[in-house]
Image: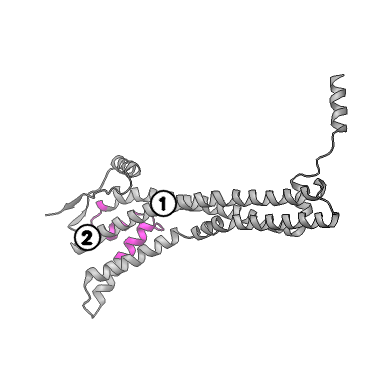
Amino acid sequence: MTFELLAAAGEAAPQNSFGFMEAMEQGGIIAWSILAVLVIMSVGSFYILFTKLLEQRKVMSQYKAVRTNFWKANSLRDGATKLDKNSAWRQLVDDAILAEDQHAKMTDKLEAHDWMHGSLARSEDTINSKLAGGLPFLATVGATAPFVGLLGTVIGIYRALINIGIAGSASIDKVAGPVGEALIMTAIGLLVAVPAVFAYNWLQGRNKRIAEMLGAFTTDLLAYINSNGTVKPAALTATSTQQAAKAARTAPAGATTTTTTTVKK
């Protein structure tokens, strides 16, 4: 008897005609177009988030080889063979070797330090620009997605007012669809924008840490070249590298770390 009453109540209950699909169907091509733009923004944001995260993790993990193996080599060329061929660190070393060779061929006696510093600065900027690729899209999505959703909101409210004017009365069946569409677009716009903003700030912070690592490595390369290989950082073991990385992550903002150097006599 209970099941029969529930079944009868379900059949007697009015069907919901104000769901998401109904609201989108009432919105027509404009509503679907705005939704498609927001979906593309969301998919693009998450794609950039995961690809840049993997790229950053790769660069950070390759830094361990720099600290544990590279500085044990007898020369830059020997050290370069210990680094991954397509890594950012290998690019800096290769550019340093190239700049050193180019300076030796110059007829104009430009200061070696100035030439090396400029060459490594350009190489470092190239790497940082590559790491920052895609982040402007995240910033654009975070700034514009709410307004794209707001466009759907404005259009939905406009359609609701048109329906009221045509019907001559503000009955719920005339305004529920357009108003529901308007609220849905606002919510979707915010759902797209908020993750993009969080991803942008997070990736920017990680890129800043990588830029600091690249800058420190560039300084070490300059010191090594200008001293003819007598000044270089002490090679760390894998354990000490992990401890140093952990200390860097837990260090308060603005704190600086020191690099130990060894001088061959």
Report the amino acid beneath label 2.
Ala
Q: Can residue 7 be seen in this view?
A: yes
How was the colour assigned to the protein in this rendering? one colour
| Residue 139 belongs to the span the image colors magenta | no
Please state if 62 lies on the left or on the right of 157 as rendered. Answer: left
Side of 60 relative to 47 (left or right):
left
Question: Within 10 angstroms of label 2, few (less than 14), some, or many (20 or more) residues?
Answer: some
Three-letter residue code for mark 1: Gly
Q: Which of 89 and 52 is in front in this view?
A: 52
Residue situated in front as seen by the camera: 19 or 118? 19
The N terminus, quarter of image:
top right
Q: Whole-percent x and y of residue 231?
A: 19, 56
Percent of width and height locating residue 217: 29, 56
Q: Can residue 54 be seen in the rendering of this structure?
A: no
Where does label 1 land, which residue? 205
Which numbered circle lies on residue 223? 2
Is residue 75 part of the magenta span, yes or no? yes
Circle 1 or circle 2, nearest the eye: 1
Q: Provide the residue span drawn in magenta.
A: 71-96
Sequence-wise, the earlier of marks 1 and 2 is 1
Q: Residue at x 25, y 76 (%)?
A: 105
The percent coordinates of residue 226 (x first, y second) are 20, 64
Q: What element carries label 1?
A: helix
Quadrant location of the C terminus?
bottom left
**Residue nearest the viewer, comparing 253 with 177:** 177
Q: Is residue 217 left or right of residue 10?
A: left
Where is residue 239? Give x, y as percent: 30, 39
Q: Which residue lies furthest to the top in this view?
A: 1
